[in-house]
Amino acid sequence: MSARPITFPPRLERLTLAVVILLLGACSVLGPRPAQRSVTPAEADQFELSGRINLRVADGAFPGRVLWRHDPALDELAFSSPIGTSVARMRQGPEGAWLITSDGEQHEAEDLRALAAEVLDWDLPIDALPYWVRGLEWPGAQAQVERDEEGRPRTLHQAGWTVSYLAWDGAGVRGLPWKLDVAGDRLRMRLVIERWNLDAGAGGQDAIAEQR
């Protein structure tokens, strides 16, 4: 006796076909991830980064988030709590520096490092940080650098600070660090960069400034 072919009700056949189409679509979406962009630290002289930050000072600690836009003439930083509440916004450019606290008070000075220290008790080495976050020596002082087997900085000692590079090649870009620790006498900062954006043009600088 010959075997009878197995048949399914039309409704079940349509459901099975729909599941197969969805699975194929998911495979096409999940497909190979695009390759990360590769740069050298010196090439990233204009950037935007966002991520998690933990600042430790004499009076305690500030865990939160940071958005930082930098080009050679301008720095803008926005600090917020882990739930997104604004803590401080800062800007330093050719016209000087300003800082706005969470309660809306605005402070102005010529130097952002002095302003942050006076208002927030944060001794942020703002002139050196744009270099250190990329894995570069700050040109303003002598440095001692210990390198890993790939020639990248593992530890950098400069101007009374120690910068420890804990991880590289994440956050969407190869060639830049994404986890680092910056330690000085009055402040220690752990930065975990979740996203590097090297295409943030000067026009993007307005996003923080417009909150002023």
Image (cartoon, grey):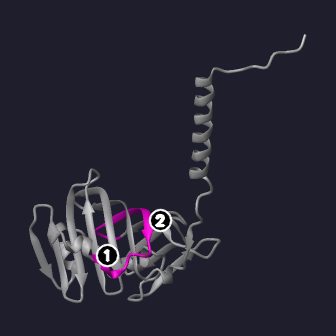
Q: Which residues are magenta?
A: 184-205
**Quarter of the figure with the N terminus:** top right
What residue occupies the far right of the structure in this picture?
1
The residue lying at 33 percent from left, 81 percent from top is 202
Front residue of this view, candidates 150 and 40: 40
The correct choice, above or below, for 2 with respect to 137 in the image is: above
Would you name the residue on which mark 2 appears?
178
Q: Where on the picture, by quarter, is residue 61?
A: bottom left
Residue 5 image point, x, y percent: 79, 20
Residue 136 lies left or right of residue 93; in this view the side is: right
Q: Where on the picture, by quarter, is residue 125?
A: bottom left
Front tag of 2 and 1: 1
Q: Where on the picture, by quarter, is residue 22?
A: top right
Front residue of this view, candidates 169 and 5: 5
Q: Alpha carbon of mark 2 to alpha carbon of mark 1: how far?
A: 22 Å
Q: Amino acid at mark 2?
A: Trp
What residue occupies the far top of the structure in this picture?
1
Residue 161 image point, x, y percent: 38, 75
**Quarter of the figure with the C terminus:** bottom left
Residue 197: in magenta span: yes
Question: In the rendered structure, which disc, 2 or 1, sits on the residue that comes first in sequence?
Answer: 2
Q: Residues within 10 Å of mark 1 (few under 14, many from 20)?
A: few
Front residue of this view, candidates 82 and 181: 82
The residue lying at 48 percent from left, 63 percent from top is 171
